[in-house]
Amino acid sequence: MDLMQSHHAILRNYPLIGHLRFFFEFIRPEIRQYFLESDNEEIPFSRAQRALVYQRAKGASDKRPFGTLVDVYKPSAEILLQRGNPINPPSVESLRVRVGAQCTQPYFISLFNISAMSFGALSANAIMALNRGAQKGGFAHDTGEGSVSVYHRKYGGDLIWEIGSGYFGCRNSSGQFDPERFKATALDPQIKMIEIKLSQGAKPGHGGVLPASKITPEIAQARGVPMGEDCVSPANHSAFHTPKELCLFIQELRQLSNGKPVGFKLCIGNIADWFAIVKAMLETKIYPDFIVVDGSEGGTGAAPVEFVDNIGMPMRDGLRLVHSSLIGVGLRDQIRIGVAGKIVSAFDMMRALAIGADWCNSARGFMFAIGCIQSRSCHTDHCPTGVATQDRLRQGALNPMDKSERVYRFHHETLLAFAEMCAAAGIRDHEAITEDLILRRDTQTKLTPLGDQLMKIPAGALLTAQAEQILDSQMHGLGKQWSLAQASAW
């Protein structure tokens, strides 16, 4: 048979041992992960990172003996500056921020929450485990753009409803935004905030298609799409086409939801496009309650290789740009910033808050908590742990009651570690965390304050005639991006 086929030359020449080549290629990721990779080799999460999540989720000891495994003298190594007289740590319950100062229904969000993952990408059992854990721990669960399913509602955990370009759960028969359907869901007390998805870190600027073969009755009901047809998420929105229209859409959703916080999520790409949104806020005087910056290193599903590797700004760079821009136009105190991108530890949170975030989201961290082993088979529907699959047999192995306890413990233990870090650094209020609390080694292996390596724009500076020069002093060509930005067009 191998000698007669014409698809694989290696099998025609080596009909016996040629099959070994394909077998070894098939099991190569597992061999590498379990036997060859070092503890700190990130692909995309290192063994040490995964182990930390597993230990905290299981309630096992997360202590490490015999010193650090990190090379503290390598470029980019970071340390938090502790004080000579540490203070008592803040309570885990106090680690929250108020979102929606201009709203009639503001939300006090935890500093650590579940990032956007849709039912459809994740199994029903995974969604139930995540939401029950969020309910027990008092933190937020982002629905992802797949809308609110019965599995999100079962245990009553706080929800952030994400609305993407497909308008799932709030669309009419032609796929356009339907205000009445939106209102019917948005008024649900379980939904605490509404998040418009402009782009995501895994595949910024790219739409998506869920094939008809993968659409179950539950998915069809949650998304408001018919059975037997492909479920399409366009690359762009139809409810708005310009930055100004985005601001007006935010205002409309806030009114329809009876005063709940409304914001948007994006992965920074063309900087002029971001500046255009900033200028639209200034012109319309309509401000989002929050902005979630999604880093290009994120992604719980699958995307084209070029989009995964080469499109979109990494989280730290995007976060600092957004934070600094809002300071520059005098809006930072009115808009909260959430952030997502490989955040699994308390130090990851500390760094993100130092750079400019108000709270952190984690997707893959909570996937690890419910059993993900980083097999990287999310797109195949063959997830071995039942997390990212619609296969009823596979997801049946995931016990929502048991895994929800792990979700709760991972969240609680991570915040407890964060509180202890705050105590060591003498931080009484997490909103007082600044970039000067962290030192980072530069390329010359010299320790310098993190703030010296980051963009800094003086308060109100972008409202002056010197805006372009100030931006150019931070990054060459940034002033030109500001001049190109228009509130009326992207």
Image: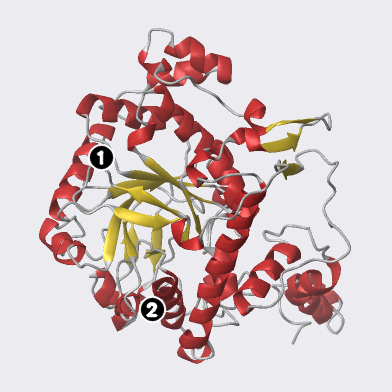
Residue nearer the viewer, 335 or 186: 335
- SS for dot 1: helix
44 with respect to 34 (left or right): left
Whole-percent x, y for residue 250 in the image: 23, 44
Residue 236 visible, this orientation: no
Whole-percent x, y for residue 334 in the image: 32, 36
- SS for dot 2: helix
Residue 208 to residue 268: above or below? below
Whole-percent x, y for residue 110 in the image: 43, 58
* Amino acid identity at mark 2: Ser
Residue nearer the viewer, 91 or 119: 91
Residue 285 to residue 351: above or below? above
At x 54%, y 24%, the residue is: 456
Q: Quadrant of residue 282?
A: top left
Per the model, the C-alpha gap separating discs 2 and 1 is 34 Å
At label 1, counting other C-alpha atoms closer than 10 Å, the crowd grade (few under 14, some 14-19, many 20 or more) is many
| Quadrant for the N terminus in the image | bottom right
Residue nearer the viewer, 229 or 451: 451
Whole-percent x, y for residue 227 in the image: 27, 78
Q: Mark 1 points at which residue?
A: 246
Residue 278 to residue 430: above or below? above
Q: Mark 2 points at which residue?
A: 213
Residue nearer the viewer, 130 or 175: 130
459 with respect to 255 (left or right): right
Report if the CB atoms under discs 2 and 1 are less than 8 Å apart.
no
* Amino acid identity at mark 1: Leu
